[in-house]
Image (spheres, rainbow, N blue to C red):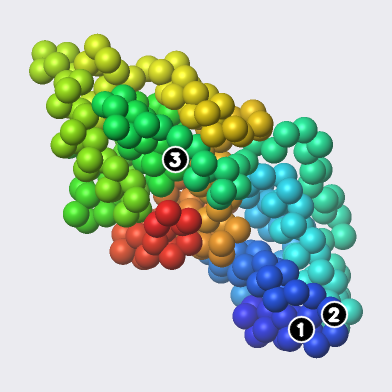
């Protein structure tokens, strides 16, 4: 598949007046598709059918990719298969039956990197709760956690020297997730300066993020922290706690991260509805996170 991609990218560089960034985006999108196809043992364009491509787009949707980014993927992949068909490599174009994703006309539910940074920079880290909020938001974005996973995170789940945390996901399934250097720095500061002022031994139960009463934060508590930081940062979009998870996945995928590595970080069981799930090497996942996450 890679040989066809190289030929297509060369044709874009030679024949179309596209910017370097646009061509790079096309290449990243198509590399994600090729990685997905390899996982289901497809290496020849002639073997690709409508169902394979439909499953790929459903997978992107499950990972929380924004509708605008999905539309860009569609455009990249449509152009690739149009080229392969026109060049005689395919007898049928598998993209013909596939409808373009609808781009939401409402406010986007994914934050861009600059917006995320504004929210992360809002908490006043000179106060015990501000420092907690900073560490919490950094962890939220660094790891792409569900709200339930964040509030149930315990101090014993942190392996900061190894650059990973242990997460208890849906169905009580454990997974190891990379955590970037920025989040590690703020967690360490929170653990040394803020959490000792919040902890109450009888009721804190080793939970990482605590409220003023010394118990673990509730879902509503997380929502209030996210909303307060969003408003304080001047972000006009409608932002929910789950927005951080969607943004995490989108920023990794748009940067060119491996689809399966992102899926494992998020704790999604399958890369397609037909494939048996196998674990990726932990060091490889950490490398993907470090290379493609904006705060890795």
Indicate the secondary structure of the residue bearing disc 3: loop
Kindly give the residue lying farthest to the left in the view shown.
201
Q: Position of residue 282 (x, y in %)?
A: 31, 59
| Disc ID at residue 16 | 2
Residue lying furthest front: 126
Q: Does residue 193 appear to the left or right of 291 in the view shown?
A: left
Residue in view at x 45 percent, y 35 percent: 122
Up-down relation of residue 68 to residue 283 (above or below): above
For image coordinates 82% across by 51% down, the residue present is 100
Relative to 119, does residue 201 appear above or below in the rendering? above
Identify the mark at residue 121; answer none if there is no mark.
3
- Name the image quarter holding residue 157: top left
| Tag 2 and tag 1, C-beta contact below 8 Å | yes
For marks 2 and 3, the one nearer the N-term is 2
Residue 94 left/right relative to 277: right
The foreground one among 164 and 264 is: 164
Q: Quadrant of the C terminus?
A: bottom left
Q: What x and y, as percent, mark residue 84?
A: 81, 78
Give x and y (percent) for residue 37.
61, 65
Q: Secondary structure at mark 2?
A: loop
- The residue under label 1 is 13
Question: Is label 3 in contact with label 1 (beta carbons under 8 Å)?
Answer: no
Name the image quarter holding residue 47: bottom right
Labels 2 & 3 near each other (Cβ < 8 A): no
Q: Residues within 10 Å of mark 2 (few under 14, many from 20)?
A: few
Q: Dot 1 surroundings within 10 Å: few (below 14), some, or many (20 or more)?
A: some
How far, Cα to Cα, is label 2 from label 1? 6 Å
In space, the residues marked 3 and 1 are separated at their CA atoms by: 39 Å
Cα separation between marks 2 and 3: 41 Å
Q: Is residue 178 visible?
A: no
């Amino acid at each position: 598949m890679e040989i066809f991609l190289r030929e297509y990218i060369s044709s874009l560089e030679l024949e179309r007046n596209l910017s370097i960034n646009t061509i790079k985006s096309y290449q990243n999108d198509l590399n994600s598709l090729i990685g997905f196809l390899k996982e289901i043992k497809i290496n020849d364009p002639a073997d690709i059918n409508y169902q394979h491509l439909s499953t790929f787009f459903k997978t992107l949707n499950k990972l929380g990719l924004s509708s605008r980014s999905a539309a860009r993927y569609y455009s990249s992949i449509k152009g690739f298969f149009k080229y392969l068909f026109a060049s005689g490599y395919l007898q049928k174009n598998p993209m013909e039956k596939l409808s373009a994703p609808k781009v939401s006309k409402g406010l986007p539910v994914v934050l861009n990197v600059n917006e995320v940074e504004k929210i992360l920079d809002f908490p006043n880290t000179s106060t015990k709760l501000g420092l907690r909020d900073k560490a919490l938001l950094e962890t939220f974005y660094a790891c792409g956690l569900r709200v339930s996973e964040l509030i149930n995170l315990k101090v014993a789940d942190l392996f900061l020297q190894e650059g990973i945390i242990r997460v208890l996901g849906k169905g009580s399934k454990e997974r190891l997730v990379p955590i970037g250097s920025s989040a590690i720095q703020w967690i360490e500061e929170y653990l040394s300066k803020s959490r000792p002022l919040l902890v109450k031994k009888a009721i804190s139960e080793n939970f990482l993020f605590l409220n003023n009463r010394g118990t673990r934060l509730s879902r509503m508590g997380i929502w209030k922290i996210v909303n307060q930081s969003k408003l304080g940062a001047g972000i006009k979009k409608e932002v929910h706690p789950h927005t951080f998870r969607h943004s995490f996945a989108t920023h990794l995928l748009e940067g060119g991260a491996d689809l399966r590595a992102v899926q494992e970080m998020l704790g999604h069981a399958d890369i397609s509805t037909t494939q048996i799930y196998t674990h990726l090497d932990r060091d490889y996942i950490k490398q993907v996170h470090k290379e493609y996450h904006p705060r890795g």
